[in-house]
């Protein structure tokens, strides 16, 4: 609809009726249907709500149902040690069914039934009673003995036995695998069993008992094990060995990315900036090198802007900061956010200052479209309609002014509407939309009556105008205007 | 509305047994640490735990206070501390720091760590390195199957996706194999097994090994579930990345369903508090609309509202006795229905508002265009514009273009993204590429030959469109060819009636049949992968599609119409709805086992290095 499709094929596609059955744009019908149902339901509320609400679940302030474990943890965190009694009271209300069930189910799946009539703790129905048709051993294997009790001092387990024991979580000494051949056989056995936990266990042993070079060399030809080692090193945060490994494997890009990743752990902006500086020379792809450079420059700028603006704001002399106090620091924000900020607080600054929008645009080569979108959103938010106007006004060589929008005026209208621009302003831009259907749609959607009426008149579309008449308020100026046009003898209606 | 099951549809097995089992195991483990103790629970385990136990059960087993595991010193003064955690390195460091702080203070306590669903050797290594091995006793709580609904089992392991599909770590394969083993001991052996993908194959092999080791236990049992189908998420990323339009999927995309329940904020409840609502088959209103295309939901709800109104109106003109009957017998049901209706009407309203704001209609159109292979350039620029405006946090859109972008578009998309969301997402892009979620065409890609061969194989007469699509789209992924071969884009004459769906495509407004579901349908029809060689090859799964059938024929005809589908890496509500539809058409019933319920936003977030 808004995308100006041209090719015949696509026309046919979009005009085919199969997607017209339902649209999210078409608020009118669906929503009014919904509202009607809502009214019907609400009208019953009086009758319903005076009744006891015993099957309404109890929800605490945080929205967690009282008696749920999540709720109880918040309670402990909130008032550790105090008002124990009150809490106990609340908790004593809990039962299985108070948990968020809406409504209380009379279901065969209710768990409470298993506990009914069994008040003494510890006297729960045993599993084998409940499920007598199932052999008890099968669903609770080894439950009787904690796994830690299995200790194994035997030295004679074969690689496959060892690996199987490891899989079962049993403690198992690997010390007897001393020759490289034995170690590798063990690793291969683990890989062939597919259990990543066991592969990692063997790798931990190999890492401890083999030199780095030998370990790396052997893993280079064992990709599955190699991936496990890389993931393990990432998880335990052994950055040094990880970088060594990437270096050994000659994976330069991963090396660079891995190093760059560390910056996420540095909170202090100055230190982070310095760290980013060390990333600039790393062997990224050409494309990523540029991004890294930009990242450094952006943070450098943000630090300057932040220091300056914090000072301005606390001094209380600058109107814009007094009227619109900053909600958060600009540090570590994305570029678009920074540009928005700059368009909001520093719009009129000369290109020479670091905080001016134009400077940002140049430094980071922000495309026109992006710039206009962001500036528009920022100025509309401040309701600076004059700036908005200037954004789209161009002069040609004869000195005539013309309105032009790199993003299309339909987008301009939508953004203005989102920032609750008044109808007069909206109207002006709706009128600039070229495609008549789009214009009519937008005008209808945003209630720009004049545009709708004039467009219908220009289209000589009497039926549509009549239909629109029913949508405007009775006795309003719009209705009068429509009537005047409908009664006019000058127009040759097409329908 | 709300299609009934065929009368011959089989009954579902009772999965509530799994909850009892998990709870009894937990109680047993708590009793291993006799006496009063404080319990520290990892945040990710709280909701699953809530579904099987509650505070009073914990209290009965001498749990005193409950804490959340977070990076703060423990305030607990108890002599015994118990930690219920996922097997993660950071949890081990946390426990170790508590123990070491106690040691420094000259304090002795008992510590127990319960790993769920299993312990990892790397965790024990950390305990050893930190010098607390032996001070802490370790146990495993094999709670890996949570029934979220009568036909949906979740392992609640969202990290499975990243661990396996991004990092290539096979640590959860044993967990999957154990879970399948548990199912076969409880519900009998599976006579027919199918699968596709490397992870599926490995899980299957390990599971078989487990069965051999403990053989005899399932022998002689009658199978309750006739088929099992294992599927890797990377066989079909596309479906998981599409915006959802069936009600349950849309609720998930909009409000995020967590562990089978959703928090509806004040904008839904039209009051000042939010409401936590369990969404499952027991919600009589929800169960009738969950699988419906969103456009049908309004009509259904308003019909319900009118009926309800009429029922209430009946009380006018009742005499005392009738009124008494009404109040004692019908009122409660009506009230429940009334509450449910208000909740879902509120949710619909809120969805409409949000989606209208987001230009959802345009987004859907763009997605459909991408799926059909029209206008890739234009769609890409639409996506860029969306990124510009910072409207959609982590748009699944970005992923929808996963069929392979030409380098210029890829660069431009990436630049726009980094500018809008932050330069550190450089790492995200690297991850997306590694996982195969976003690909750039290599210059002179050699797969072209394969594709032209494919287009020759496609017997369809109207092959004009497909050549177009080929020239404009991906050289790397074979989605186009698969789509043609499996007829994923239905040809529709006239309007696709979403009220009376004719195929699984209804879950995407009639525009696309989910690839994953189509594969399952095809294999079930053939009872094997026979005749699907080309499809399997296009999926790059040459060696990774398998069929395994047992000879002994003890399976009842009813059990042969029960199918367990295992999604490794997550499944979406749209896929669930599509298969429920297929089941109704064919007289099957599907049971879903997933590592976690997912959607496009979750898949994308899993690729990010930046913690929210």
Image: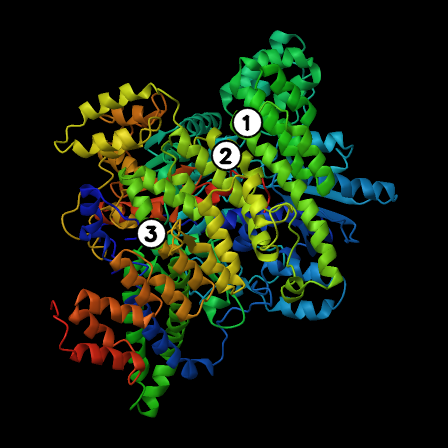
| Frontmost residue, A245 versus A10 | A10
Residue at the image position 50 percent from the left and 50 percent from the top: B19
Q: Is mark 3 on a helix, strand or loop?
A: helix
Residue B101 is situated, as x and y percent measured from the top left of the image, at 82, 43
Q: Name the residue under label 2.
A: B429
Q: Earlier in the sequence, mark 2 or mark 3?
A: 3
| Frontmost residue, B92 versus A455 | A455
User: Answer yes or no: do the residues labelled 2 and 3 have beta carbons within 8 Å?
Assistant: no
Q: Mark 1 points at which residue?
A: A196
Residue A450, visible in the rendered structure: yes
Query: In this rendering, do the residues under marks 2 and 3 share a single chain?
Result: yes
Chain of the residue that carries numbered disc 1 in the rendered image: A
Chain of the residue that carries numbered disc 3 in the rendered image: B
Color encoding of the figure: rainbow
Q: Name the residue under label 3.
A: B362
Residue B23 is situated, as x and y percent measured from the top left of the image, at 55, 50
Residue B2 is situated, as x and y percent measured from the top left of the image, at 27, 59
Q: Which-is-in-front pick, marks 3 and 1?
A: 3
Q: Is residue B302 left or right of residue B215?
A: left
Query: Gap between marks 3 and 1, in whole Å?
Result: 43 Å
Residue at the image position 34 percent from the left and 70 percent from the top: A447
Can you say whether A144 is above or below B330 in the image? Answer: above
Quadrant hosting residue A465: bottom left
Residue at the image position 40 percent from the left and 34 percent from the top: B409
Quadrant hosting residue B486: top left
| Frontmost residue, B311 versus B328 | B311
Residue B505 is situated, as x and y percent measured from the top left of the image, at 26, 46
């Amino acid at each position: 609809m808004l995308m100006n499709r041209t090719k015949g094929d696509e026309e046919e596609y979009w005009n085919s009726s199969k997607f017209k059955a339902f649209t999210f744009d078409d608020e009118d019908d669906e929503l009014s249907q919904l509202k009607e149902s809502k009214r019907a339901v609400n009208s019953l509320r009086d009758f319903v709500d005076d009744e006891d609400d015993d099957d309404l679940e109890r929800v605490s302030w945080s929205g967690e149902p009282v008696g749920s474990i999540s709720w109880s943890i918040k309670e402990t965190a909130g008032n550790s040690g105090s008002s124990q009694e009150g809490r106990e009271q609340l908790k004593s209300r809990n039962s299985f069914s108070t948990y968020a069930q809406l409504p209380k189910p009379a279901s065969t799946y209710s768990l409470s039934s298993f506990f009914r009539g069994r008040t003494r703790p510890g006297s729960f129905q045993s599993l084998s009673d409940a499920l007598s048709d199932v052999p008890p051993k099968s669903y609770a294997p080894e439950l009787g003995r904690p796994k830690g009790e299995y200790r194994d001092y035997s030295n004679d387990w074969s690689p496959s036995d060892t690996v199987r024991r490891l899989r079962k979580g049993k403690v198992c000494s690997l010390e007897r695998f001393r020759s490289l051949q034995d170690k590798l056989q063990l690793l291969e056995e683990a890989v062939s069993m597919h259990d990543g936990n066991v592969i990692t266990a063997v790798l931990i042993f190999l890492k401890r008992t083999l030199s780095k070079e030998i370990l790396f060399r052997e893993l280079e030809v064992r990709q599955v094990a190699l991936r496990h080692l890389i993931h393990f090193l990432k998880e335990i945060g052994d950055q040094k060995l990880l970088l060594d490994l990437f270096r050994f494997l000659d994976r330069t890009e991963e090396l660079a990315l891995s190093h760059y990743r560390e910056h996420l752990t540095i909170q202090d902006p100055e230190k982070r900036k310095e760290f980013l500086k060390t990333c600039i020379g790393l062997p990224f792809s050409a494309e990523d090198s540029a991004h890294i450079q930009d990242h450094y420059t952006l943070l450098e700028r943000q630090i300057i802007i932040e220091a300056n603006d914090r000072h301005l704001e606390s001094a209380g002399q600058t109107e814009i900061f007094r009227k619109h106090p900053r909600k958060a620091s600009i540090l570590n924000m994305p570029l678009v956010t920074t540009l928005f900020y700059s368009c909001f607080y520093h719009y009129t600054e000369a290109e020479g200052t670091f905080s001016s929008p134009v400077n940002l645009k140049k430094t980071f080569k922000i495309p026109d479209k992006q710039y206009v979108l962001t500036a528009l959103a920022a100025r509309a938010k401040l309701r600076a309609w004059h700036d908005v106007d200037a954004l789209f006004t161009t002069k040609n060589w004869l000195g005539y002014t013309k309105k032009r929008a790199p993003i299309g005026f339909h987008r301009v209208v939508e953004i203005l509407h989102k920032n609750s621009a008044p109808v007069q302003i909206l109207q002006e831009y709706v009128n600039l939309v070229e495609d008549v259907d789009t214009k009519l749609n937008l005008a209808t959607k945003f209630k720009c009556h004049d545009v709708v009426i004039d467009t219908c008149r220009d289209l000589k579309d009497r039926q549509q105008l009549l239909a629109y008449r029913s949508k405007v308020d009775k006795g309003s100026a719009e209705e009068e205007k429509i009537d005047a046009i409908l009664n006019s003898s000058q127009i040759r209606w097409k329908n | 509305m709300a299609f009934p099951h065929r009368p011959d549809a089989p009954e579902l097995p009772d999965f509530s047994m799994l909850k009892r089992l998990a709870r009894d195991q937990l109680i047993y483990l708590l009793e291993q640490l006799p006496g009063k103790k404080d319990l520290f629970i990892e945040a990710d385990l709280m909701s699953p735990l809530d579904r099987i136990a509650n505070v009073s059960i914990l209290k009965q087993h001498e749990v005193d206070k409950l804490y959340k595991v977070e990076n703060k010193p423990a305030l607990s003064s108890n002599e015994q501390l118990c930690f219920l955690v996922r097997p993660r390195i950071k949890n081990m460091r946390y426990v170790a720091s508590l123990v070491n702080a106690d040691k420094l203070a000259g304090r002795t306590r008992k510590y127990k760590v319960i790993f769920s669903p299993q312990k990892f050797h790397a965790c024990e290594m950390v305990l050893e390195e930190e010098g607390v091995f032996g001070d802490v006793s370790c146990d495993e709580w094999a709670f890996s199957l949570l029934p979220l609904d009568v036909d949906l089992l979740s392992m609640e392991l969202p990290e499975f996706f990243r661990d396996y599909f991004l990092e290539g770590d096979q640590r959860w394969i044993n967990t999957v194999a154990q879970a399948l083993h548990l199912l076969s001991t409880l519900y009998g052996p599976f006579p027919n097994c199918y699968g596709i993908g490397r992870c599926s194959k490995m899980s299957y092999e390990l599971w078989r090994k487990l069965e051999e080791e403990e053989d005899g236990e399932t022998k002689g049992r009658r199978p309750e579930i006739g088929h099992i189908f294992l599927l890797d998420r990377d066989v079909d990323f596309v479906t998981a990345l599409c915006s959802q339009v069936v009600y349950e999927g849309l609720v998930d995309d909009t409000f995020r369903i967590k562990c089978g329940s959703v928090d509806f904020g004040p904008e839904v409840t039209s009051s000042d508090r939010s409401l936590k609502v369990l969404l499952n088959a027991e919600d009589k209103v929800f169960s009738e609309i969950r699988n419906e295309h969103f456009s049908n939901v309004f009509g259904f709800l308003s019909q319900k509202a009118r009926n309800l109104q009429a029922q209430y109106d009946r009380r006018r003109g009742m005499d005392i006795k009738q009124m008494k009957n009404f109040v004692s017998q019908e009122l409660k049901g009506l009230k429940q229905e009334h509450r449910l209706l208000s909740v879902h009407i509120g949710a619909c309203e809120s969805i409409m508002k949000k989606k209208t704001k987001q230009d959802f209609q345009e987004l859907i159109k763009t997605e459909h265009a991408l799926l059909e292979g029209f206008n890739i350039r234009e769609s890409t620029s639409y996506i860029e514009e969306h990124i510009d405006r910072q409207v959609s946090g982590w748009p699944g859109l970005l992923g929808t273009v996963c069929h392979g972008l030409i380098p210029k578009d890829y660069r431009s998309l990436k630049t726009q993204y980094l500018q809008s969301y932050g330069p550190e997402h450089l790492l995200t892009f690297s991850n997306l590429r590694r996982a195969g979620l976003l690909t750039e065409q290599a210059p002179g890609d050699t797969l072209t030959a394969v594709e032209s061969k494919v287009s020759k194989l496609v017997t369809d007469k109207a092959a004009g469109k497909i050549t177009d699509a080929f020239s404009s789209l991906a050289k790397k992924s074979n989605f186009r060819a698969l789509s043609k071969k499996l007829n994923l884009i239905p040809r529709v004459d006239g309007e696709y009636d979403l009220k009376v769906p004719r195929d699984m495509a209804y879950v995407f407004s009639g525009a696309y049949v989910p690839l994953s579901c189509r594969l399952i349908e095809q294999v079930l029809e053939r009872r094997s992968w026979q005749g699907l060689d080309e499809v399997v090859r296009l999926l790059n799964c040459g060696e990774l599609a398998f069929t395994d059938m047992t000879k002994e024929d003890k399976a009842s005809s009813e059990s042969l119409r029960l199918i367990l589908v295992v999604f490794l890496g997550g499944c979406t509500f749209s896929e669930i709805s599509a298969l429920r539809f297929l089941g109704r058409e064919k007289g099957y019933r599907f049971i879903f086992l997933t590592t976690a319920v997912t959607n496009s936003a979750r898949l994308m977030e899993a690729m990010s290095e930046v913690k929210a």
